Amino acid sequence: MFSALQSLPLSVPRVAGESATSLAARLARRNGAPRLITFCSDMGLDHRGLTNGSDTEVLRLAALAGCAPELLLNWTPRLTADSWFRLGRERIKFTAFARTRIRACPTCLAGGRTAHQAIWQLSSIRRCRTHGCLLVELPVTPANKEIFDFAYHATRVRSGSFDTITADESQLENYLLARIQGGTGKEWIDRLPFHVAAQTSENLGALILLGPDAPRDLITEAEWHQAGSIGLSIVFRRATFTP
Ligand SMILES: [Zn+2]
């Protein structure tokens, strides 16, 4: 029973913006469990439910971690219906997520930070807001059930194994984060689903930045990052243009 769960004697403080699986993975390591899935089994948590953001499992984890559940729930992508997730105040289709890859900030990793920000699960979020550098993809090919064990993977990465590419703040990333935190506004783009708003901005920006013939698979993360910002700025300029 959830009410019977006591907080573990060895705890880790919740980091702002991290998801339930990130906290669980750190709590597992703190308490000597080799992997998140082992920890879930030992603690009676449903691992699959936790990775899908089940309210019940997130609340059980909050009890084990001894933290307030509201923010943990808010920052955990929660599967609510087929292929859609709830994150903060947004409802987001699975296609906006990159949940089969592990992306992280190279500066966070180098500093020994093993918390994973929930928004790093979104394909169109490409920059660490703390360090102002582009996220990198960890060279791991874990099974699906292990992809959310971020603390485990983060501690196995060799320091300095990634290039750190600094990047300007992105208007698109700021916009998407504002939708997650505050809901949608009244521009026409706000009426588009989250993933469509992101892709429309990025595709428009890529067209302007690189031209119509640029092969999509050769567009770099830095270029997509810049493209999203350019695209969104044009979308907003058009929205306020009166002929
Ligand atoms: Zn960082």
Image (spheres, rainbow, N blue to C red):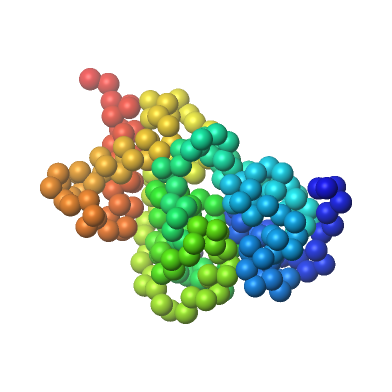
Q: How many marks?
A: 0
Q: Residue at x 22, y 57 (%)?
A: 218
Towards the viewer: 195 or 38:
38
| Left or right: 67, with 22 as reference point | right
Residue found at the far top of this picture: 243
Up-down: is 189 above or below 145? above
Q: Residue at x 70, y 48 (%)?
A: 57
Indicate the quadrant containing the C terminus: top left, top right, bottom left or bottom right.
top left
| Left or right: 151, with 58 as reference point | left
Q: Position of residue 108 (x, y in %)?
A: 51, 68
Query: Looking at the image, can residue 36 be seen?
Result: yes
Residue found at the far left of this picture: 213
Q: Position of residue 24 (x, y in %)?
A: 66, 60
| Left or right: 220, with 214 as reference point | right
Q: Position of residue 180 (x, y in %)?
A: 53, 40
Query: Looking at the image, can residue 72 be seen?
Result: no
Q: Residue at x 32, y 27 (%)?
A: 239
Q: Residue at x 57, y 40 (%)?
A: 79
Residue found at the far right of this picture: 4
Residue 55: name its quadrant: top right
Q: Position of residue 132 (x, y in %)?
A: 44, 61
